Image: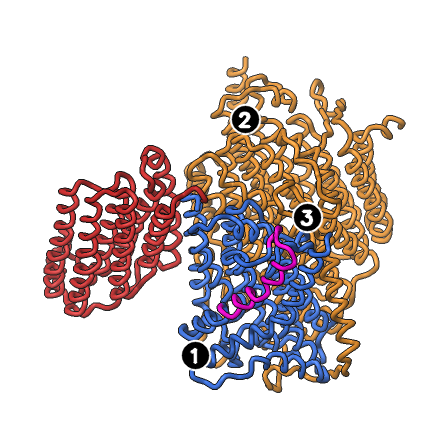
Chain colours: A red, B orange, C blue
């Protein structure tokens, strides 16, 4: 431990924090808290980006940090909060798998991700290569969250958290993606949230609920009577 | 005779023959309880003690062989005694000494098998277990293995008048034979084309990797069936309650260990170089078994079933250590393999003492009250103080509490697990440390089970009026219990000495020696320089000193009177025995938390019931998921072939004839 | 054994015996302040114990010898535990007889005896308390063990003084794994010491209590010993926490008598801070139903396991 510079220690700490936040999201049932956790996750990511920028002196990382701050810490959580208020969904329904079970699966996923990332980490030459495993774990855990939740809002949060994980992974493996890609992804995410927001209103108009199991009635064979 | 004095093997054989002779002597006056119980069983206990002494002595003597010209022509029995068999012979002798003394005071005139026959079966059982550990070829091994299974089957069905007991015996016999077939196949694979069935030939055979793996898995299945690994554990909770208590003690304390012996013999000795992933398989099965066993033990309300499930747990822990040792051995970390093997052997010894002790304790209770159900016992510490306090030693040991013996093996196992992250395989190195958490969970649950076991039987108020007439155990029974309890204490207090005794075995199995002991004799420090040490003796002395100082201090400074009064119970006046937790009530948190394990059937009363009844049935999902469908499958196949059964003798003779002709054509 | 070792050992034991009730008094005081109540005296736990020692004991007619022996055993186990845990200096001779895993075993011994004693009289509350206590115990132990695993992986030893020595003397570093396990350990501490959110030490409401239900039948000197043992247990857990997570300020192998002397105010400061934090946690959280306890302790376990995995991945 003694040989590792402080910025890298801090970066590792941020990585651990990201992992912790993913688990906090998995266990959280209130959608408002979920969005807040997403904002905190964005902040941790922001911190990690800044630290990496300081450590490597790469200027484009400052730009990504600004992008993270604007989009992931401020704009998206604000949009989601507004959506929650307008739609009036505050609680997710009981998840498909109970909390303890989800956690157990989560731990196994982390083991899997860490195991997968070990060869990649040995290839990468960055100071943060150890954190790649955590990035993979965050992506997979977000996926798990999307699978186990019923409400569309939670799934959007899971989607955004997954994007955070990908972003962190790219950062720790190669010090960030090219600027163009980063802007593109940021724009995609923003548009996705806007489109999904509109989509939610449509779903609610149609079913009076945001519970996704209603969508099951849109299957081919059940098409006709699903509406009543 | 002089050779017997120099050769532990001959001495062991002499004791086995003596056992046989005692068994046969029982037939001289088969109905005389006084002759059989009061003369033969104490004699047999003496023989057991001698065996333990000889086995302990043999640990330091080089391996030796013998060939006995018994059996088929050209197929003599090969026998070999080495350090591994020495440890298990010691276990057999030391545990059976206590059990036989207890049995001398236990057997009464009753229904079922006559005393003389019982004596024969009992001693045949003992001798065959000894022979299993000495066998050095597959024939001798299988013959003694089958003798062991059959004699114990007859012992289980002592009270063969009862249909439940016949059913339990049948289930036991069935699974024992499925296991035996797997072991036979494993030996068949291991001879490696040489068609030599001596163990020496198997040691020499170099098997290709897939065949070695097949042999290991077959052996794990076969020995697992005898040991009670999930899902082959179903016979244990049926057979143990059915058998008389000394027999349950012998089966649980000693016979299960023969399976451990077999697994060790095959994996580390006959196959030679185990591969690391075999260990992962064994470890996973072992961990699941441990957790499964202890969770079910916590939900039982029959005291012998509870102990049977607890045995399943302990076997799970032993196989966890077994798996860990294989993993370490497979990746070349031999010293840690040695540490895990020490933990395994130590736990086997411990379990032999503590589980025998507890089974005998339940035997004494059963004898005195006629009750096996926990829901009808309670408060026996006042009526049966000897049994209660000696059983408490066993219960605390089984709960894994220092300074008793259960803790030592658990501690050693956890010390071994602390190095598991160094295993150079990606996923294994992260999952193994978590396996340690499951071990601790199982051990902590065992403490829960033991508090339930001891608390419900011996503490509190008697739940039935009939318990007021309960009497304490007789002198011989007390002697047996005390011997086993003393074993628990000694194994707990002198781990360094025991481990020194086990060094030879571990070296033989793992190929590496534990580093020499540099710490003083009273301090257990398995890996010098690591600053991980434990001293049971110091522990006991320190706690005793503090307790005595406190008692003296309190007496000196604050000696006030002690007044006896009704219990306070928050001011509730009319307290009766039915207000205590029942065994079911005590298991309720477990049923709630581990609900996924159980097959629960509950009958809840409605608010309008005149006589409300609450019933809960806890079943094993394995029956529903595995054995139900399996039984159905067998039934369907049998139905399809039912036309074969014609009912005419001539047809059956025809079948035999056709088979004979076909075989002759095939062979000639 | 050098004189300084004996002095360290005696000081360690004396500090535990004296400071444990004071620590409880301090937490109660902080809690009262935070909840806008007028605070009881910080000496109240002492007075309670003294008063109890002076009374005649009343024991239920059905109680066996186990019932009368248990308070002494529980107290003895807690005192020995206090002797093993390095609260001020790492040079404790007694600690060789029990490492951190044996310490967990020692605490389990105390718990089992307490539960057995509670079942001895055969009241409804006693058995209820016993089964809940054992339940909390088996849920907390795996989490506690994982915490110890992480600490001993970092310092390559399971002896508490060696762990403390290692953590206190190396260059300062950020250990995410230790941060995770610290959270896990705090949760275990709350559960094992019958604090909110698992149990309320101030309640005597029958259906919700765990710890108090075990002690219902005790009176006078036996109760005094049990109460003292409970205070010692809390103190011990706090000191384990200090030893693993904030080891700075203890006198290490190099330190002389002065360092040992200097470690006394450091320990006091740590205890004051820890008491405040505990009181704050207890004030802001609500007691959960007994059947949420598994979820609470499973979360603690999760934290500890994450700490372990993060340690294996990041090496920190």
Near-viewer residue (B597 or C76): C76
Residue B656 circle label = 2
| SS for dot 3 | helix
Vertical order, B92 against C238 (above or below): above
Q: In this rendering, do the residues under marks 1 and 3 share a single chain? A: no
Q: Label the magenta part by its dominant secondary structure.
A: helix
Q: Chain of mark 1?
A: C
Q: Nearer the viewer, residue B663 or B124?
A: B124
From the image, tell me which residue sits under label 1: C34
Looking at the figure, which quarter contains the C terminus of chain B? top right
Q: Nearer the viewer, mark 2 or mark 3?
A: 3
Determine if residue B142 is in view: no
Apparent side of residue B182 relative to residue C256 in the rendered image (left or right) = left
Q: Is residue B493 left or right of residue B446?
A: right
**In the image, is A109 to the left or to the right of B554?**
left
Asked if one can make out residue B31 in the rendered structure from this viewpoint, the answer is yes
Task: Name the subunit of mark 3.
Answer: B
Q: Furthest-top residue in view? A: B668
Residue A187 coordinates in the image, percent (x, y): 12, 50
For the residue carrying disc 2, how many other residues have a C-alpha within 10 Å: few (<14), some (14-19), or many (20+)? Answer: few
The magenta stretch is: C252-273
Q: Secondary structure at mark 2?
A: helix
The answer to which of A146 and B245 lies nearer the viewer is: A146
Q: Are marks 1 and 2 in contact (CB under 8 Å)?
A: no
Q: Give the CA separation, mark 1 to mark 3.
A: 52 Å
The residue carrying mark 3 is B350
């Amino acid at each position: 431990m003694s040989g590792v510079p402080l910025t890298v220690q801090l970066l590792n700490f941020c990585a651990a924090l990201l992992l912790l936040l993913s688990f906090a999201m998995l266990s959280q049932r209130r959608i408002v808290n979920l969005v807040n956790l997403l904002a905190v996750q964005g902040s941790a990511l922001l911190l990690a980006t800044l630290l990496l920028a300081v450590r490597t002196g790469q200027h484009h990382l400052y730009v990504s940090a600004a992008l993270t701050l604007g989009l992931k810490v401020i704009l998206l959580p604000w949009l989601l909060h507004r959506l929650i208020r307008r739609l009036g969904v505050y609680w997710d329904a009981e998840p498909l798998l109970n909390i303890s079970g989800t956690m157990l699966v989560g731990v196994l996923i982390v083991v899997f991700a860490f195991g997968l990332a070990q060869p990649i980490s040995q290839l990468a030459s960055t100071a943060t290569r150890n954190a790649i495993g955590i990035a993979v774990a965050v992506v997979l855990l977000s996926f798990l969250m999307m699978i186990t939740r019923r409400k569309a809002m939670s799934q959007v949060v899971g989607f955004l958290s997954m994007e955070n994980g990908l972003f962190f992974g790219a950062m720790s493996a190669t010090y960030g993606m090219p600027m163009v890609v980063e802007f593109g992804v940021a724009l995609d995410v923003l548009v996705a949230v806007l489109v999904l927001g509109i989509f939610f209103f449509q779903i609610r108009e149609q079913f009076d609920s945001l519970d996704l199991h209603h969508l099951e009635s849109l299957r081919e064979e059940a098409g006709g009577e699903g509406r009543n | 005779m002089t050779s017997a004095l120099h050769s532990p093997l001959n001495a062991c054989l002499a004791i086995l023959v003596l056992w046989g002779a005692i068994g046969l002597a029982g037939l001289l006056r088969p109905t005389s309880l006084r002759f059989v119980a009061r003369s033969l069983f104490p004699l047999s206990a003496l023989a057991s003690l001698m065996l333990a002494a000889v086995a302990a002595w043999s640990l330091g003597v080089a391996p030796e062989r013998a060939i006995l010209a018994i059996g088929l022509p050209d197929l003599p029995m090969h026998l070999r005694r080495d350090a591994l068999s020495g440890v298990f012979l010691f276990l057999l002798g030391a545990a059976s000494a206590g059990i036989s003394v207890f049995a001398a005071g236990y057997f009464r005139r009753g229904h079922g098998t006559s005393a003389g026959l019982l004596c024969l079966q009992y001693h045949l059982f003992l001798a065959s277990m000894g022979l299993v550990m000495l066998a050095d070829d597959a024939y001798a091994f299988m013959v003694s293995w089958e003798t062991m299974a059959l004699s114990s089957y007859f012992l289980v069905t002592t009270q063969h008048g009862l249909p439940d007991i016949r059913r339990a015996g049948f289930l036991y016999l069935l699974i024992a034979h499925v296991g035996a077939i797997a072991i036979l196949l494993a030996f068949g694979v291991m001879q490696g084309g040489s068609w030599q069935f001596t163990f020496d030939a198997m040691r020499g055979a170099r098997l290709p990797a897939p065949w070695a793996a097949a042999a290991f898995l077959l052996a794990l299945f076969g020995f697992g069936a005898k040991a009670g690994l999930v899902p082959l554990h179903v016979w244990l909770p049926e057979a143990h309650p059915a058998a008389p208590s000394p027999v349950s003690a012998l089966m649980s304390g000693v016979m299960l260990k023969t399976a451990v012996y077999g697994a060790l013999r095959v994996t580390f000795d006959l196959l030679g170089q185990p591969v690391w992933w075999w260990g992962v398989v064994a470890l996973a099965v072992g961990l699941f078994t441990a957790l499964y066993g202890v969770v079910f033990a916590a939900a039982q309300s029959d005291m012998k079933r509870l102990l049977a499930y607890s045995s399943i747990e302990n076997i799970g822990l032993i196989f966890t250590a077994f798996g860990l040792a294989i993993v370490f051995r497979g990746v070349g970390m031999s010293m840690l393999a040695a540490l895990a093997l020490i933990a395994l052997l130590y736990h086997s010894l411990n379990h032999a003492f503590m589980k025998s002790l507890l089974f005998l304790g339940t035997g004494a209770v059963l004898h005195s009250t006629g009750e096996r159900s926990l829901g009808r016992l309670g408060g026996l510490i006042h009526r049966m103080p000897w049994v209660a306090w000696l059983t408490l030693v066993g219960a605390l040991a089984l709960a894994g509490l220092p300074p008793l013996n259960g803790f030592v093996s658990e501690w050693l196992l956890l010390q071994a697990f602390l190095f598991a992250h160094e295993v150079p395989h990606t996923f294994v190195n992260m999952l193994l440390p978590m396996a340690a958490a499951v071990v601790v969970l199982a051990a902590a649950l065992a403490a829960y089970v033991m508090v339930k076991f001891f608390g419900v039987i011996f503490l509190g108020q008697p739940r039935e009026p009939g318990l007021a007439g309960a009497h304490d155990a007789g002198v011989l029974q007390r002697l047996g219990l005390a011997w086993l309890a003393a074993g628990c204490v000694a194994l707990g207090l002198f781990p360094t000495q025991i481990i020194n005794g086990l060094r030879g075995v571990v070296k033989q199995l793992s190929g590496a020696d534990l580093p020499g002991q540099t710490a003083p004799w009273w301090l257990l420090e398995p890996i010098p320089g690591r600053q991980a040490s434990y001293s049971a003796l110091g522990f006991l002395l320190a706690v005793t000193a503090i307790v005595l100082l406190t008692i003296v201090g309190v007496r000196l400074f604050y000696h006030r009177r002690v007044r006896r009064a009704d219990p306070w119970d928050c001011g509730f006046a009319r307290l009766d025995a039915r207000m205590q937790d029942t065994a079911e009530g005590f298991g309720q948190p477990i049923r709630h938390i581990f609900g996924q394990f159980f097959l629960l059937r509950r009958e809840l009363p409605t608010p309008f019931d005149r006589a409300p009844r609450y019933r809960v049935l806890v079943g094993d999902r394995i029956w529903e998921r595995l054995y139900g469908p399996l039984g159905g499958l067998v039934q369907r196949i049998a139905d399809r072939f039912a036309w074969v059964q014609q009912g005419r003798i001539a047809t059956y003779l025809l079948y035999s004839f056709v088979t004979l002709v076909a075989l002759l054509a095939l062979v000639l | 054994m050098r004189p300084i070792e004996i002095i360290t050992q005696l000081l360690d034991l004396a500090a535990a015996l004296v400071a444990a009730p004071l620590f409880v008094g301090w937490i109660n005081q902080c809690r009262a302040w935070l909840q806008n109540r007028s605070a009881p005296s910080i000496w109240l736990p002492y007075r309670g114990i003294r008063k109890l020692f002076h009374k005649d004991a009343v024991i239920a007619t059905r109680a066996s010898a186990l019932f009368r022996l248990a308070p002494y055993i529980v107290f003895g186990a807690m005192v020995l535990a206090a002797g093993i845990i390095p609260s001020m200096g790492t040079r404790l001779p007694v600690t060789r007889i029990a490492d951190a895993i044996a310490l967990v075993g020692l605490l389990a011994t105390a718990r089992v005896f307490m539960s057995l004693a509670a079942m001895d009289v055969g009241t409804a509350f006693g058995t209820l308390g016993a089964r809940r206590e054992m339940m909390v115990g088996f849920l907390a132990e795996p989490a506690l063990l994982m915490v110890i695993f992480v600490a001993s992986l970092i310092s390559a030893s399971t002896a508490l003084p060696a762990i403390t020595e290692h953590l206190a003397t190396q260059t300062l570093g950020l250990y995410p794994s230790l941060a995770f396990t610290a959270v896990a350990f705090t949760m275990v501490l709350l559960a094992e010491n019958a604090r909110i959110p698992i149990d309320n030490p101030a309640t005597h409401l029958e259906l919700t209590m765990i710890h108090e239900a075990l002690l219902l039948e005790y009176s006078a000197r036996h109760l005094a010993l049990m109460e003292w043992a409970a205070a010692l247990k809390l103190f011990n857990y706090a000191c384990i926490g200090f030893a693993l997570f904030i080891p700075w300020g203890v006198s290490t192998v190099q330190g002389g008598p002065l360092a040992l002397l200097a470690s006394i105010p450091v320990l006091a400061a740590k205890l004051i801070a820890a008491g405040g934090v505990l009181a704050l946690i207890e004030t802001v959280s609500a007691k959960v139903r007994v059947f949420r306890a598994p979820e609470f302790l499973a979360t603690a376990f999760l934290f500890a396991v994450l700490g372990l995995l993060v340690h294996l991945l990041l090496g920190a």
